Image (spheres, rainbow, N blue to C red):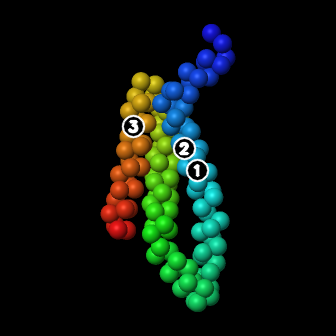
Amino acid sequence: MSLTSLTRASRAHPGFIAALVHRLSGLALAIFLPLHFLSLGLAFEAETFAGFVAWTAHPLVKLSEALLVAALAVHFAGGLRLLAVEFLGLTRAQSLWISCSFAFGAAATILFLLRVF
């Protein structure tokens, strides 16, 4: 069995996909944070902040907020899954933990969208 076939087989594993989603959601949050801090910095000037708040009413921004909530929920749930796998020594139940992580992320996003729209 070659290294290439082993690599392909491991990429199809649910644990690999969960780890990839966890890393990508963390990257999305890392990109968001500087923009969030910038908007908080605008709070010192009332006119600038009011313009920023008006901009956030745009539907594309609302969709971005929903994606942010999804990234945060999936990253949080994936982190809990990772802690459980590392410290509780789970092996057979890992697929269930992965499914629960994604279900939690989806539920949090749906609840957020119901409140926004």
Q: Identify the residue at the far bottom of this view.
A: 47
- Residue at left 41%, top 43%? 102
For the residues labelled 2 and 1, the Cα–Cα distance comes to 6 Å
Quadrant that contains the C terminus? bottom left
Q: Position of residue 34 (x, y in %)?
A: 65, 65
For the residues labelled 3 and 2, the Cα–Cα distance comes to 13 Å
- Residue at left 58%, top 50%? 26
**Which label's residue is closer to the chain start, 3 or 2?**
2
The residue labelled by disc 3 is 99
Mark 1 lies on a secondary structure that is: helix
Tag 2: residue type? His
Q: Position of residue 116 (x, y in %)?
A: 37, 68
The residue labelled by disc 2 is 22
Mark 2 and mark 3 in contact (Cβ < 8 Å)?
no
Mark 3 lies on a secondary structure that is: helix
The residue labelled by disc 1 is 26
Q: Is 102 rendered above or below residue 16?
A: below
Mark 1 and mark 2 in contact (Cβ < 8 Å)?
yes
Q: Position of residue 46 (x, y in %)?
A: 58, 89
Q: Does any portion of residue 114 appear in the rendered image?
A: yes
Mark 3 and mark 1 in contact (Cβ < 8 Å)?
no
Q: Position of residue 91 (x, y in %)?
A: 46, 25
For the residues labelled 1 and 3, the Cα–Cα distance comes to 19 Å
Q: Residue 114 or 30: which is nearer the viewer?
A: 114
Where residue 16 sits, quadrant-wise, is top right
Tag 3: residue type? Ser
- Residue at left 48%, top 30%? 14
